[in-house]
Amino acid sequence: MKYTSTRSNETVNASLAILNGLAKDGGLYVPESIPTLDLNALKDTSYQSLAFEILSLFLDDFNKEDLKQTINSAYNENNFSHESITGLRKYNDNTYFLELFYGKTSAFKDQALSLYPYLLKLAMKEHDIDHLSILTATSGDTGKAAMEAISDVEGLSIAVLFPKDGTSFIQKLQMQSQKGNNVYPLAIEGNFDDAQSAVKEFFLKHQDLPITSANSINIARLLPQIVYYYDLVHRLNTVKPINVYVPTGNFGNILAAFIAKEMGLPIQKLIVCTNNNNVLYEFFKTGVYDISTKTFEVTHSPSMDILISSNLERMLYFMFKDKEKVAGWMEDLKNKKRFQLSKSELQKLQETFDTQMCTNECTYEAIQEVYEASNILIDPHTATALPQDESEALNVIVSTASPYKFPKLYNKLFNLNSKDDFYILNKIDELTDEPYPPFIKELETIDVRFNQNIKLEEIESVLKEFIIKEAKL
Ligand SMILES: *Cc1c(COP(=O)(O)O)cnc(C)c1O
C-alpha cells in the first residue's frame, strides 16, 4: 500500500508517511486506494484481532509479527481500564453510546496514541533513525495522550503546544504535571489554531530537522481509529441501519468512520456534530467553508473549538478523487479564507454526511436530559452529539471523553456551588455510577512540573532549542 499526497503526485510508503507526518507539498497523505474488509468473513473478532486485520491491510510492508506485538502492547489492561477496550452502553431502544475514554488520559485520543509510538519505532527502525522529536499542537486531549504514550520511550522526545486559556483546568494540569525526561508541554499565548499553524509552519520550514507530528494529520493516528467502528458494528449485531453521531473538531474521528464505511462496514449516515464553532456545520449544510466571517469561540467543549479542520481535506480527496481541485480549495482557504463546493458536489457529500450544531446552552441541556433519563453522565463533547432529529435507524453517539475531564458543568447540574474542581470530581464520584479514572484522581496531589507561558513569536526558537538538545545535535 502506497500513500500519496492529497495535493500532488508525491508518493511514499507507509513508514515514510508516518515519519513525515505532513506531505512535502503541504497536503496530507492518503492511502492510494481504500481496501475492503468484510466483517462477516472474520473468525476472530477480538479488538486486537480486528486491529491486526485492519492495520495489516494499510501497513502491508510492516512485518506481521512486529505488527501483532505492537497491537498487543497497546491494547491491553495496562493501557485500558475496560475489558473490551471500549464501552458500549445502551441509552434507549434506539440509541447507544460508544465510549472511547477508557485509556490512560480519559479521551478517545488514547485509542490511536497508545499504538502510535510503537508504529513510529517500527518506521524508524526501517529507516535507521535513532532519534525523533515529536511536535504536536493540542486543544487539550491529543497533547496529553501523546505525552503519556511517549514518556520515557527511548529514541523519542515530545513537545506539545497548547492554548494557555483554551483547555479545561484538568487538561492543563494533566499536561503540566506530565512525568518523563523527554516531554515538554508549552502553554502558548494564543488559541488552538495559532498552535496548529505554528507547528505546521515549523514543519514546512525545518524539513532538515529530525521531527514528526503526532497530530491527527499523521496516518498513524487515523488508521487505528477505524478499528473501533468495526468493533462497534460487530458488537451491535443488528440488521437495522446504523447512524453514527461524532463530536467533531479536526475531523479525524469521523474520517475514520468514513473510511470504515468505504471499506464495506454497514454504516448508513455519519453525523458531523459541532459546537458554536460551527464552520463544519455550515459547510455540510451549504457547501461553503468560510472562516472569513468567523471568530474563534471558547466553549464548553474545548477539544472541538476549531476553525480549520485539517482532516476534512482527506475526506474531500476520497469523495472527489481530484487532487487539483483539493489543492485549489486549500489554496482558496489559505488566501481567501473560504472555499466553496458546487451544488452537485454538496449533494454528493450529503448522501453520506449529515450535520448538527449544539450551543453551550444545548450542551448543558443535553447533559441534563441524558442524566435525568438514564443516570448516565456524559461529557460536554459527547453532549453535542445527542441526536437532534428522529430517525428509524439505530443511533450511536460517540462518547469522546470521560465527564471527569470537564467538571465545570456538573457544578450547576448537581447544585454544588463550588470553585474547586476536585471537590466537584469527588461529588461526581459520590453521586453517579461513573468510575473516577485513577489518572485523574492522582492529579489531586500531583506536582506541576512545567508552568511557563510562551509568546507566539518565541515558539520557533524554543522548539529549535528543544529539538537540538533532545537529539544531541
Ligand atoms: C479531539 C476530540 C474531539 C474531536 O475529534 P476530531 O477527531 O479532532 O474531530 C472531540 N471530543 C474530544 C473529547 C476530543 O478530545
Image: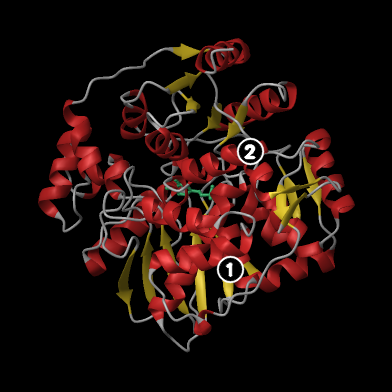
Amino acid tagged 2: Leu
Residue 153 at x, y percent in the picture: 41, 32
Circle 1 sits on which residue?
Answer: 260
Secondary element at image label 2: helix
Residue at 47% in and 89% down:
239
What is the quadrant of the N terminus in the image? bottom right
> Which residue is at 43% across, 86% downward?
238
Residue, disc 2: 19
State left or right for residue 8 relative to residue 135. right
Frontmost residue, 324 versus 288: 324
What is the C-alpha distance between the residues marked 1 and 2? Answer: 24 Å
Crowding at label 1, few (<14), some or many (≥20) Cα neighbours within 10 Å?
A: many
Q: Is residue 200 visible?
A: yes
**From the Cβ of disc 2, is ligand 1 less than 8 Å away?**
no
- Which image quadrant is residue 473 in? top right
> Is residue 420 at least partly visible in the picture?
no
Depth order, front residue of 155/167 = 155
Identify which residue, 119 or 261, lies in the foreground. 119
Upstream in sequence: badge 1 or badge 2: 2
Determine crowd level at label 2: few under 14, some 14-19, many 20+ residues with C-alpha closer than 10 A.
many
Quarter of the image for residue 99 reads bottom left
| Residue 345 picture location, percent across and down | 81, 65
Q: Position of residue 364 (x, y in %)?
A: 35, 51
